[in-house]
Image (tube, helix red, strand yellow):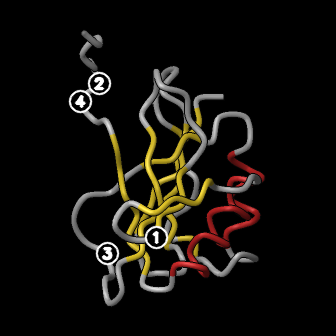
Amino acid sequence: MAEKRKDIVVWFEIPAANFERAVGFYEKLVGYSLMRENMGAQAAVFKHDQEIVSGCVMEKPGHKGMEGVMIYLNCNGFLDDAVARVEKAGGKLCSPIVELPGDMGRFIHIEDTEGNRVGLHAVV
C-alpha cells in the first residue's frame, strides 16, 4: 500500500484560455520546458518529484481567474530573475516584492497572460 500524502495541497491547475500562450509564459518565467500531457484536456506540468506538490497549466477556454484561490510558485534562488521576465513574457507585476518577517522569505503577485493572479515566493 502506498504511503498517504501528508501535504494539505497535493495539486494545482492554472487555467488557460489560450493554452500555448500560457505555457510559453510560464516556461519563460521559470526558465525550463513544462511537460505536456493530455489529462482530458491539454496540460503542461511543472517539474516535480513524487515527494513534493506540483501542478500544471490546464487548457480551459473562456476561464479567467483574478479572484478566488491564489497559488504561489516556488522561486527559490531565482525570484529576481523571474520578476524581471514577467513583463517580457507578457504578464504584469501586481505588487512590489514584499519582504516577510524572520526567515519567511519574500514574494510578489503577478498577473499571467490569461488574467490569473499568481504569487511568486522565495526563501532564498
Instruction: Tell me the quarter of the picture where residue 105 sits.
Output: top right
Determine whether 117 is above or below 19 in the image: above
User: Disc 3 designates what residue?
Assistant: 65
Q: Position of residue 73 (x, y in %)?
A: 51, 47
Q: Quick one: label 3 or label 1, which is nearer the N terminus?
A: 1
User: Disc 2 designates what residue?
Assistant: 7
Q: How far apart in space, not on screen, are marks 1 and 4 (Cα)? A: 25 Å
Q: How far apart in space, not on screen, are marks 2 and 3 (Cα)? A: 24 Å
Q: Quick one: label 1 or label 4, which is nearer the N terminus?
A: 4
Of circles 2 and 3, the one toward us is: 2
Determine whether 6 is above or below 73 in the image: above
Q: How far apart in space, not on screen, are marks 2 and 1 (Cα)? A: 26 Å
Question: At numbered mark 1, what does the secondary structure look like: helix, strand or loop?
Answer: strand
User: Disc 4 designates what residue?
Assistant: 8
In front: 95, or 117?
A: 117
Could you tell me which residue is drawn at 62 percent across and 63 percent down?
26
What residue type is disc 1 on?
A: Gln
In front: 110, or 58?
A: 58
Q: Residues within 10 Å of mark 2 (few under 14, many from 20)?
A: few
Instruction: Tell me the quarter of the picture where residue 10 sits.
Output: top left
What residue type is disc 3 on?
A: Gly
The numbered dot on residue 42 is: 1
- Determine contact: label 3, label 4, CB under 8 Å: no
- Determine contact: label 4, label 2, CB under 8 Å: yes
Total numbered labels? 4
Q: Quick one: label 3 or label 4, which is nearer the N terminus?
A: 4
Question: At numbered mark 4, what does the secondary structure look like: helix, strand or loop?
Answer: loop
What residue type is disc 2 on?
A: Asp
Q: Position of residue 50 (x, y in %)?
A: 48, 25
Q: How far apart in space, not on screen, are marks 3 and 1 (Cα)? A: 18 Å
The answer to whether 53 appears left or right of 70 in the picture is: right
